[in-house]
Image (cartoon, grey):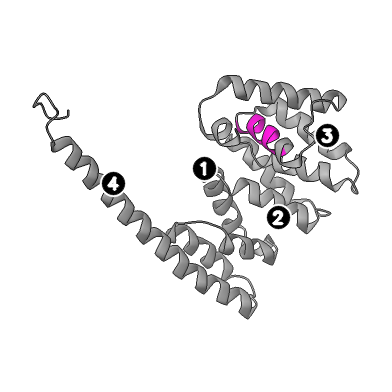
């Protein structure tokens, strides 16, 4: 459901997720008992969410007690699931909060890095301000599931401006190898798919007419 809601075109599912999310924010009802289901509901609503929904979630986050880690985790993940650039920027601005815990920062980063457009915005923003970034953001970016060599080099260039531990330098080196393999594999798959499609188009149909 989350895959369809976030990446597909399912207006009814998105609308229902938003309705349930707003009801939960209003009176605490309609929150799924299962944490994964709750996270999925919020992610679907947020993926097509607007500033009004973002504001509601932000207010709920501010009102949630620090020791209510389960709810705070859900709200952080939801804020990180928005896709509008202006709202992604607002989520990234949360990383500048002086009292933000590392665990919350990781949750926010993890969320925005899951989708390509917010991910590109995140890399550009963080890489542009290396001096103000904590060391661990480079650790996360170098260890995630990216498959873009140019993007990884952007992270590496930013990392060089920080005093990195040997272990982090080694992690970046390993990541270069992994990203290189991933990119090469994608290229081979793309070429095979293109060749298969071209071969299919060249074959005549049962009526003797080639595929258009």
Identify the residue at horizontal 84%, vertical 48% (top origin).
69
> Which x, y percent locates residue 196?
23, 44
Q: Secondary structure at mark 2?
A: helix
Q: Secondary structure at mark 3?
A: helix
Identify the residue at horizontal 67%, vertical 42% (top origin).
80
Give the residue number, with chain letter if any, for mark 4.
Answer: 193
Of residues 13 and 72, the one drawn nearer to the viewer in this rendering = 13
Disc nearer the start of the sequence (3/1): 3
Question: Magenta stretch: residue 4 in it?
Answer: no
Q: Image quadrant of residue 135?
A: bottom right
Of residues 116 and 187, the one drawn nearer to the viewer in this rendering = 187
How far apart marks 3 and 1 lie (CA) works out to 26 Å
Crowd rating for badge 3 (residues with CA inside 10 Å; few <14, some 14–19, many 20+): some
Depth-wise, is mark 4 or mark 2 nearer the camera?
A: 4
Give the residue number, with chain letter if any, for mark 2.
Answer: 106
Give the residue number, with chain letter if any, for mark 3.
Answer: 60
Q: Image quadrant of residue 177?
A: bottom left
Main secondary-structure element of the magenta-colored stretch: helix
- Is residue 84 shown above or below 142? above
**Residue 117, numbered circle:** 1
């Amino acid at each position: 459901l989350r895959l369809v809601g976030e990446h597909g075109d399912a207006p009814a599912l998105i609308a229902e997720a938003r309705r349930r999310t707003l009801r939960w924010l209003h009176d605490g009802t309609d929150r799924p008992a299962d944490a994964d289901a709750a996270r999925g509901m919020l992610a679907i609503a947020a993926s097509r969410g607007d500033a009004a929904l973002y504001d509601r979630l932000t207010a709920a986050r501010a009102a949630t007690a620090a020791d209510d880690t389960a709810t705070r985790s859900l709200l952080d993940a939801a804020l990180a699931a928005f896709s509008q650039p202006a709202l992604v920027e607002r989520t990234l601005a949360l990383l500048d909060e002086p009292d933000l815990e590392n665990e919350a920062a990781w949750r926010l980063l993890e969320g925005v890095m899951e989708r390509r457009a917010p991910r590109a915005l995140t890399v550009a923003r963080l890489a542009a301000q290396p001096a103000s970034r904590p060391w661990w953001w480079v650790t996360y970016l170098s260890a995630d599931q990216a498959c873009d060599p140019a993007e990884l080099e952007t992270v590496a260039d930013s990392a060089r401006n920080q005093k990195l531990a040997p272990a982090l330098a080694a992690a970046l080196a390993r990541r270069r190898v992994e990203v290189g393999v991933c990119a090469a594999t994608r290229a081979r798959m793309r070429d095979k798919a293109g060749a298969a499609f071209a071969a299919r188009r060249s074959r005549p149909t049962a009526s003797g007419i080639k595929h258009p």
